[in-house]
Image: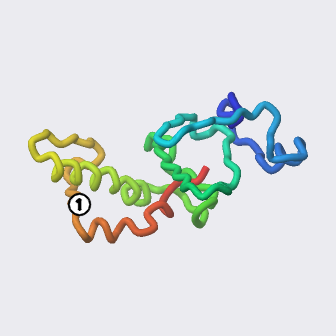
Amino acid sequence: MVPGSHKLGKVDIKAMVARAGTERLPGAVPIVCEPGDVAITNRQAVHGSFANTSQDWRVTLNFGFHRRRSVLGVQGGGVHNAAAVYDADRIRQRAAMIGYGIDARRQRFPEQTPYLYAPHEGSVYRWDDAARASMRDYNLMDLSI
């Protein structure tokens, strides 16, 4: 990852690679992790990884969020899906995962008071087989920026 690159705004990674003459960008540093380790970076930092040539699995789990006001009306870059404007309906559909997660936890820990997510006030999200089926390809609702 390239430290400080998150402060540069939108960067042209292809141009960075072309200038460097290699994918090993000047100033980039490795994030070395052992199994079970967690690395946290700004989502806008220039980062990447090389192919896993070992016999071991490499799993990456990404967490990220945007404030609603920062994405409403924004067009996604179409990196992992078709370019689209993030309108109120798309935000609602993508945020359904939050409601399903809250209900899944409520079912698993019924003695706990469930989290109240203000944007879902008045809506009902049930974690069940139908919800699970609706999650197929849900990542295509992500905003690629």
**Residue at the extreme left of the image, as rendered:** 111
Residue marked by disc 1: 127
Task: Determine the residue positioned at 37% across, 56% down.
Answer: 92
Count of numbered badges drawn on the protein: 1
Task: Determine the residue positioned at 19% across, 51% down.
Answer: 122
Q: Pinpoint residue 100: horizontal percent, then vertical percent.
A: 28, 55
Image position of 140 (left or right of 29): left
Name above or below for residue 33 compared with residue 130. above
Name above or below for residue 137 compared with residue 5. below
Task: Determine the residue positioned at 67% across, 30% down.
Answer: 7
Q: Pinpoint residue 33: horizontal percent, then vertical percent.
A: 57, 37
**Residue at the extreme front of the image, as rendered:** 55
Identify the image quadrant of residue 126.
Answer: bottom left
Image position of 95 (left or right of 33): left
Q: Secondary structure at mark 1?
A: loop
Task: Determine the residue positioned at 33% across, 56% down.
Answer: 96
> Which residue is at the front of the view, 33 or 120?
33
Image position of 136 (left or right of 56): left
Identify the image quadrant of residue 116.
Answer: top left
Give the position of the N terminus as an image quadrant.
Answer: top right
> Which residue is at the front of the view, 135 or 27?
27
Applied colour scheme: rainbow
Q: Residues within 10 Å of mark 1 (few under 14, many from 20)?
A: some
Q: Pinpoint residue 136: horizontal percent, then vertical percent.
A: 41, 69
- What kind of residue is marked 1? Trp
Q: Pinpoint residue 57: horizontal percent, then vertical percent.
A: 54, 56
